[in-house]
Image (spheres, rainbow, N blue to C red):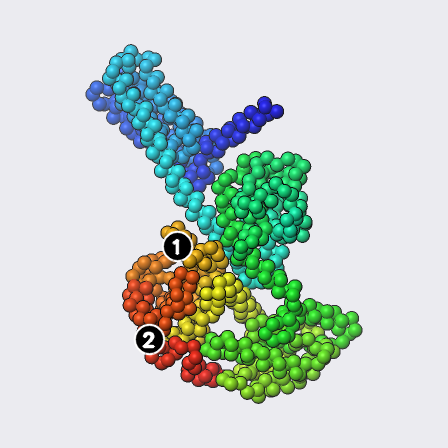
């Protein structure tokens, strides 16, 4: 057993030495080029030695041959050899050959009096930069031995004139190697840190987008496991939820080979003293380097693992685990990385759990009382199957409120919610008992009508449309557009909805407030890619908005923060002379400007005291991450507004440190709206300010934190009485009426 342990340690050290002796793939070409340059420099500088006085000229032919050989090999290294494909050992052979050439050059040019021993410094510099400590130590010994060879064949070497430089040269080699290796290591650490941060942000971004786009919880948890394994270079990873003190359930897992993971839904016992139990008790990552073959990890083919707790709120929700096949492959650095990744995922996991809980509790939309999207699609699939079985027709209508975005932006969400409820009520009054109604998007409804032709469906939907248009609203006129399709066009549920959507977009493209029956010959005028792009974008924005609401709702002080900022920035845009269309684009950006805070831990978001410099840098990352999350959904200008809304005219903002002339106007307006809400609603670290106090502070910060034009728009709103929530916006009715 002892011998086996010794062999294992020796094998580990040999592997470590082999790793240190290999130049990183991205630096192999550089190493070959530098090596070639050193050979050429050495060869060219040897040539003058054959002419200089005070240098032995008894071996001039040998020196010339050495110089020629060094130059030829240096040229080959620079111009001929493909170092990316050449085995690493060739580079070592080149350096060893260089040591041999230096030893011969010393002997051929005077021995103890030869100046060519200085070339050994080239070897020290080269080894210290490109290889690890153990390899550098080996080459240092080789350099010292090469310089000491003179003692064996030149009697003059024992004189103080040679021994003194030798005594000084050896420590100089050590200091030079230490300095170069330390600087190299520091740069490598910075690069590694940057790469790790980029990898973590990329992983988090992919998870956040999956959550925002409404991916299934199984797919999201599997994505979390795959991203965790990728970050650590592990063979497998899994995320488990604690069901009780004694068991946990696998929510998602990933492995690099078949049979290397426990499938989703597997119940795993949590025994006292196990790594999972210790992680839950200590709230710290637990690393095990030697799992037994019959253990839970060993049975999957792995020998080492890290288990880190995942905390959601104040509770330990579960654990995130990563495994590797080789002992010692996972390190203490990996423990910290996995712990940090688990902390960043807490908000996403909470969002997944909340969504799953809501789906389990009810299948109805809370605002309208109609079926939600999931329930409606399930009912549609069942009704289509029944219609096919009994050879009956079935029609589907997709109904959308006209200009609903403008109502939301100019009238507020309360007015929008009232409008949704009114439309739902009118549709329900005209639906039969056997029909199914559902809210399938923000302002989109679906009406499933069994045993109904498309002509009969048109009559029913037209009746409802006229009733909705005649319904009086306190502030806004309500109209809807609709598209209809029946099972003659398709017997596939998803395609029925898609075809009805096509007809809906035809209605909108031809004036709105009308119904249209799907006809492929006519609907082809509106291209399928355009319809899909519009539909996907609206759904994606809705998903990002729900994620932003979830982040705001985690703290009472920030509840509905994004909605308030969006409402104010719309007014600011109007005051600044923006068109209604561009004001809506800015409002969309404002609704999701804080989604990057999904990567900021709750402790930092809710901290009452001042942030430390490190914590402040961590919080600053949310603007860039929000832009990256939104860039696949919003247009480039909206993304840039989000990315730069924390920039300041005095150049002290982030993430780029832009000056006033470089800050986009939309970002400047968003910065004022964001800060205004913080000032007037308060935070754990500050009390709310009155309107006059906040306005005075904004005016004082012109040129420092805010641009003059943005604060000017704020002052204009105040002069018009629009900063008070009780005031009615006199412009919004005229804007909407002009759109209709």
Where in the figure is residue 28, as x and y percent of width and height? 43, 37
Residue 166 quadrant: top left
Q: Secondary structure at mark 2?
A: helix
**Residue in front for this viewpoint, 639 or 332:** 332
Q: Residue at x 39, y 74 (%)?
A: 573
Residue 611 disc label: 1
Q: Residue at x 38, y 41 (%)?
A: 187
Where in the figure is residue 20, as x and y percent of width and height? 46, 33
Is residue 115 toward the left or the right of residue 280 in the image? left
Viewport quadrant of the N terminus: top right
Residue 715 disc label: 2
Residue 79 quadrant: top left
| Residue 411 in the image: above or below residue 134 | below
| Residue 589 in the image: above or below residue 518 | above
Residue 262 visible from this viewpoint: no
Residue 233 disc label: none
Q: Residue at x 47, y 70 (%)?
A: 563
Of the numbered discs 1 and 2, the one sitting upstream in the chain is 1
Looking at the rendered image, the disc whose residue lies closer to the viewer, 1 or 2, is: 1
Where in the figure is residue 451, as x and y percent of width and height? 74, 78
| Residue 614 in the image: above or below residue 352 | above
Is residue 297 toward the left or the right of residue 67 in the image? right
Residue 424 visible from this viewpoint: yes
Is residue 346 toward the left or the right of residue 108 in the image? right
Q: Residue at x 65, y 47 (%)?
A: 246
Task: State the CA–CA distance, disc 1 to disc 2.
Answer: 31 Å
Are discs 1 and 2 less than 8 Å apart at CB? no
**Residue in front for this viewpoint, 493 or 727:** 727
| Residue 546 in the image: above or below residue 80 | below
């Amino acid at each position: 057993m002892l011998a086996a342990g010794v062999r294992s340690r020796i094998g580990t050290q040999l592997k470590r030495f082999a790793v240190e002796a290999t130049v990183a793939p991205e630096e192999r070409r550089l190493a070959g080029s530098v090596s070639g340059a050193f050979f050429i420099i050495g060869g060219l500088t040897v040539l003058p030695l054959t002419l200089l006085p005070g240098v032995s000229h008894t071996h001039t032919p040998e020196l010339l041959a050495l110089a020629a050989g060094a130059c030829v090999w240096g040229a080959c290294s620079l111009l001929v050899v493909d170092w990316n494909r050449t085995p690493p050992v060739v580079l070592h052979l080149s350096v060893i050959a260089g040591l041999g050439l230096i030893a011969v050059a010393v002997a051929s040019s005077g021995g103890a009096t030869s100046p060519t021993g200085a070339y050994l410094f080239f070897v020290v510099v080269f080894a210290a930069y490109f290889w690890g400590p153990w390899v550098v130590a080996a080459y240092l010994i080789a350099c010292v031995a090469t310089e000491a060879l003179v003692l064996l064949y030149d009697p003059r070497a024992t004189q103080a004139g040679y021994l003194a430089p030798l005594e000084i040269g050896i420590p100089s080699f050590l200091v030079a190697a230490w300095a170069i290796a330390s600087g190299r290591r520091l740069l490598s650490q910075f690069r590694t840190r940057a790469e790790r941060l980029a990898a973590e942000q990329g992983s988090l971004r992919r998870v956040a987008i999956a959550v925002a786009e409404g991916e299934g919880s199984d797919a999201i948890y599997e994505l979390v496991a795959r991203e965790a394994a990728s970050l650590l270079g592990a063979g497998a990873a899994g995320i488990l939820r604690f069901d009780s003190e004694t068991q946990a359930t696998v929510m998602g897992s990933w492995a690099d080979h078949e049979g290397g993971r426990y499938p989703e839904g597997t119940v795993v016992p949590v025994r006292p003293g196990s790594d999972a139990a210790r992680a839950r008790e200590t709230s710290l990552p637990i690393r095990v380097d030697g799992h037994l073959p019959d253990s839970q990890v060993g049975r999957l083919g792995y020998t080492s693992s890290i288990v880190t707790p995942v905390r959601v709120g104040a509770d330990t929700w579960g654990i995130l685990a990563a495994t590797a096949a080789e002992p010692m492959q996972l390190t203490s650095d990996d423990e910290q990385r996995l712990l940090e990744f688990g902390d960043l995922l807490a908000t996403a996991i909470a969002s997944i759990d909340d969504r799953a809980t809501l789906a389990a509790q009810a299948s109805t939309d809370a605002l309208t009382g109609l079926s939600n999207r999931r329930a409606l699609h399930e009912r549609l699939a069942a009704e289509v199957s029944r219609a096919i079985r009994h050879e009956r027709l079935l029609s589907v209508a997709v109904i959308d409120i006209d200009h609903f975005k403008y109502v939301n932006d100019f009238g507020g969400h309360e007015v929008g919610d009232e409008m949704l409820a009114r439309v739902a009520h009118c549709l329900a009054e005209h639906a039969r008992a056997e029909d199914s109604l559902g809210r399938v998007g923000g302002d989109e409804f679906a009406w499933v009508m069994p045993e109904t032709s498309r002509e009969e469906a048109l009559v029913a939907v037209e009746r409802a449309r006229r009733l909705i248009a005649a319904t009086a609203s306190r502030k806004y006129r309500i109209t809807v557009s609709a598209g209809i399709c029946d099972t003659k066009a398709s017997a596939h549920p998803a395609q029925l909805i898609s075809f009805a959507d096509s007809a809906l977009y035809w209605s909108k493209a031809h004036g709105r407030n009308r119904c249209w029956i799907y006809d492929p010959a006519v609907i082809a005028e509106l291209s399928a890619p355009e319809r899909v792009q519009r539909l996907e974008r609206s759904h994606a924005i809705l998903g990002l908005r729900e994620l932003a609401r979830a982040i705001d709702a985690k703290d009472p002080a920030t509840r509905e923060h994004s909605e308030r900022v969006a409402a104010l920035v719309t007014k600011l845009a109007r005051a600044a002379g923006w068109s209604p269309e561009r004001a809506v684009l800015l409002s969309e950006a404002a609704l999701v400007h804080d989604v990057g805070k999904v990567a900021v831990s709750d402790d930092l978001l809710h901290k009452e005291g001042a942030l430390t410099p490190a914590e402040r840098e961590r919080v600053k990352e949310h603007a860039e991450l929000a832009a990256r999350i939104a860039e696949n959904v919003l247009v480039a200008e909206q993304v840039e507004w989000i990315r730069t809304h924390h920039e300041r005219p005095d150049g002290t903002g982030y993430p780029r440190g832009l000056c006033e002339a470089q800050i986009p106007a939309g970002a400047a307006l968003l910065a004022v709206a964001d800060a205004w809400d913080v000032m007037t609603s308060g935070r754990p670290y500050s009390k709310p300010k009155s309107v006059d106090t906040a306005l005075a502070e904004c005016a004082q910060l012109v040129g420092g934190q805010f641009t003059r034009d943005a604060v000017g728009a704020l002052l204009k709103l105040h002069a018009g009485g629009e900063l008070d929530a009780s005031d009615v916006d006199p412009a919004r009715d005229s804007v909407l009426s002009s759109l209709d």
